[in-house]
Image (cartoon, rainbow, N blue to C red):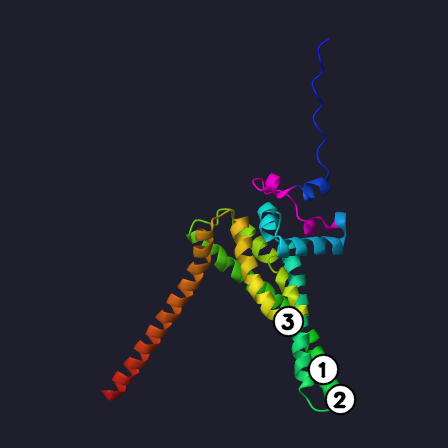
Amino acid sequence: MEPQPDAPPPPPSAETQLFRGSAEVAEAGTEPIPWEAWKQFGFFTALWLTWNDSVFRPVSFFRRMPPRSGIGPALGYTVLITVVGFFFSMYWGSVEGALSGSGDEGVLFTLAGNLATLLFGLAFMIPLYVGVLFVTVAIVHVGFAVVGAGRRGYEATFRAVAYSSGPAVFSIFPFFGPYLSLVWGMVLLYIAVREVQRTTNARATLGFLVPLLAFLVFIIFLGFLFELLISSVDLGQTI
């Protein structure tokens, strides 16, 4: 009797695939992130897992993140995180401004007015942020493409930028929170795009420097044109 071939192992469950070791998925880059499987984990659990991993384990998180799983979930994540950060940042600013007033009644009145203005401003902040986000991603991606580090496409860069917005939550802390958010956010952005685009530190650095240098050259060019225009006007007046 011929021996029967071994049965193939059963496919891993979705939960197992989500939490495989980073060494196993580093090359494939096809492990879904919890936020994009929120129906399985629950909304708040998926949000917490995604935020915690992206902020405190960024290399592993962005290395295993699929480069093309849709812009929608990434956009929803960054808008939610940014709104929370913006709200608390403006809230603490309102508290500080209110406390600088005179009298308890003045403090309460000023604080209530500032909070009402803040809530009203959120309706305008969200579409403005979305527009700025798409432009920012386009600029970053062009810079990476110029140095040959954007081969995984615009969507990959967008997802990297969007999921690197986690440090905005640090604005819940007064005084030092916004500064921590800014510094760690810049570091996280660098790591995110580098890992998602599978590039080197040198190319990633150049990718971020190219748009900055182009902007500086543009400013210098505008200054030169302005100086030339002023000189032409002065010359015309002397004649």
* Residue 143 appears in view: no
Q: Is residue 23 left or right of residue 199?
A: right
* Kind of residue at badge 3: Phe
The answer to whether residue 190 is above or below residue 9 is below
Tell me the number on the disc at residue 111: 1
Counting other residues with Cα less than 10 Å from the Cα at mark 2, is it few (<14), some (14-19), or many (20 or more)?
Answer: few
Q: Secondary structure at mark 1?
A: helix
Q: Secondary structure at mark 2?
A: helix
Counting other residues with Cα less than 10 Å from the Cα at mark 3, is it few (<14), some (14-19), or many (20 or more)?
Answer: few
Tell me the number on the disc at residue 104: 2
The magenta stretch spans which residues?
21-39
Precedes in sequence: disc 3 or disc 2: 2
Q: Which residue is mark 3?
A: 124
Magenta stretch contains residue 128: no
Q: CA distance from mark 3 to mark 2?
A: 31 Å
Question: In the image, which is nearer the foreground, mark 1 or mark 3?
Answer: 1
Question: In the image, which is nearer the foreground, mark 1 or mark 2?
Answer: 2
Q: Is residue 40 left or right of residue 163?
A: right
Q: Secondary structure at mark 3?
A: helix
**Which quadrant, please, contains the N terminus?**
top right
* Kind of residue at badge 1: Leu
The answer to whether residue 11 is above or below residue 164 is above
Precedes in sequence: disc 1 or disc 3: 1
Counting other residues with Cα less than 10 Å from the Cα at mark 1, is it few (<14), some (14-19), or many (20 or more)?
Answer: many
Choose between 104 and 84: the one closer to the eye. 104
Q: Residue at x 43, y 49 (%)?
A: 148
> Where residue 37 sits: x, y (%)?
71, 48
